[in-house]
Image: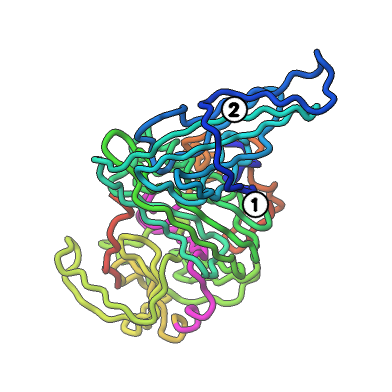
Amino acid sequence: MDVRRRLTLLAVTIAATPLVLGGCTAERKPAAGAAPGGPAAPTVSVTPADRAKDVPVSAEVGTTVNNGRVTSVKLTDDKGKSVAGEPREDGSSWVPAAPLSGGRTYTAEVTATGDAGRTTVGRTTFTTVANTTRSALTSVLYFAGNQTYGTAMPVTVAFEPAVPTAARAAVQRRLFVKTDPPQPGTWSWLEDGSQVYYRAPDFWRSGTTISVRSALEGLPIGKEYVGDADRRSTSKIGRQVALDIDNATKQMSVFQDGKLVRRIPVSLGKPSTPSSSGKMVIMEKHQQTRFDTRGEPDGGYVVDVEDAQRLTWGGEFIHAAPWSEGDQGYTNVSHGCANVSSTAADWLMGVTQVGDLVTVKGTEVPLRPGNGWTAWNTGWAEFARGSALPVPPGLKPAPATSPPHPGVVAGGSSPAPAPSASGG
């Protein structure tokens, strides 16, 4: 995937002029005063094919140009209404701003211009599928709009059922992320295809605006499914906060903007229910919630807790645990959660954001891929290998000036399992 693509969508003006149907042919229009035998006019090919039927509503207007570049794309429906859209930055296609309507006929006109000003126009008309017998594959976009997230917040899309390997490139191509200021990244799939994450090589810069479009509605996915929905959201990245929990010392170190601001005693999971070690991200925050583990293999209890922050789908939280304050800093007695005092938990709720990095080290078990938003639990090289599309080798983390540390200032260069209520 080109480092400059970033799946960025560039605005283009759309005209509502009815089009003359000419198939996928090219119409030559020499520039005024062009001398015979001068520079060749560009050639342009357009997809879908002329008079194609049962085209998915996720269709894009594909463009292939020789001896020039696309300078205009017009798409109109069978009532003469113009369709808004934007081209991919690599020029390979033009993407409608919303799914097309089913059972409708559309006409596309693509104008290409050569270096000498000569133009060529390619046209095609096609009809979208009226109904599909395929089931909708459920997707969930874990990036809500109008939020302020932490600097480690990945864009996460989860799927039920999981996306087969052969379909992942097509799905990934319909997942768009734009950052302002620009900070390119890539998508990376879990091995089982149940989740895909987007992040940059380095943590997001504070103040960055991230706009996401998961444009999957009607997209053929494998032989049995189509995508379920077209979703958009835009949010911002807030201050830099990171939590570092060390099982050896039973202490949590809280960093803001790279500076240590507080140490908090903790009690982690006891040997029979150990906490996970790895790089996690705060997923949810609850002033009050209930852990109900009845029916779970190691559960059987119900407890109400305050100031709880989810770290994993499996039910690991940071939360207030007044019943274990005498053990915090000394002994692990929890069911896998990070227990802190009521005072500390209340303070943390005012400091942290969903998307803040939490690093736990020294426990008996490693964090499992996909048990939470685990995009940061691998190095960049391994993360990039999970992309279904090429990742340019130049997309790399900024050179480290000191040993990596969770408190370093960010920036510089089946769906997810049903959330478990366990904790403790």
Residue 64 is at least partly visible in this image: yes
| Residue at 45 percent of width and 66 percent of height | 282
Q: Could you say where residue 268 lies in the image, as x and y percent from the top left? A: 37, 68
Within 10 Å of disc 2 (Cα), the crowding (few <14, some 14-19, many 20+) is some
Residue 213 included in the magenta stretch of the image: no
Within 10 Å of disc 1 (Cα), the crowding (few <14, some 14-19, many 20+) is many
| Residue at 42 percent of width and 43 percent of height | 58
| Residue at 67 percent of width and 31 percent of height | 112
Question: Residue 205 is drawn in which quadrant?
Answer: bottom right
**Which mark is in front, 1 or 2?**
2
Residue that mark 2 sits on? 64
The three-letter amino acid code for the residue at tag 1 is Gln
> Residue at the top extreme?
37
Viewed as shown, does residue 380 lie left or right of 52?
A: right
Q: Which mark is residue 149?
A: none
The C terminus lies in which quarter of the figure? bottom left
Q: Could you say where residue 339 lies in the image, as x and y percent from the top left? A: 38, 75
As drawn, 220 above or below 246: above
Query: In the rendered view, how is the structure colored?
Result: rainbow
| Span highlighted in magenta in the image | 346-374
Residue that mark 1 sits on? 183
The three-letter amino acid code for the residue at tag 2 is Thr
Q: Could you say where residue 157 lies in the image, as x and y percent from the top left? A: 41, 52
As drawn, 254 above or below 83: below
Nearer to me, 412 or 122 = 122
Nearer to me, 119 or 250 = 119
Question: Residue 315 is drawn in which quadrant?
Answer: bottom left
The N terminus lies in which quarter of the figure? top right
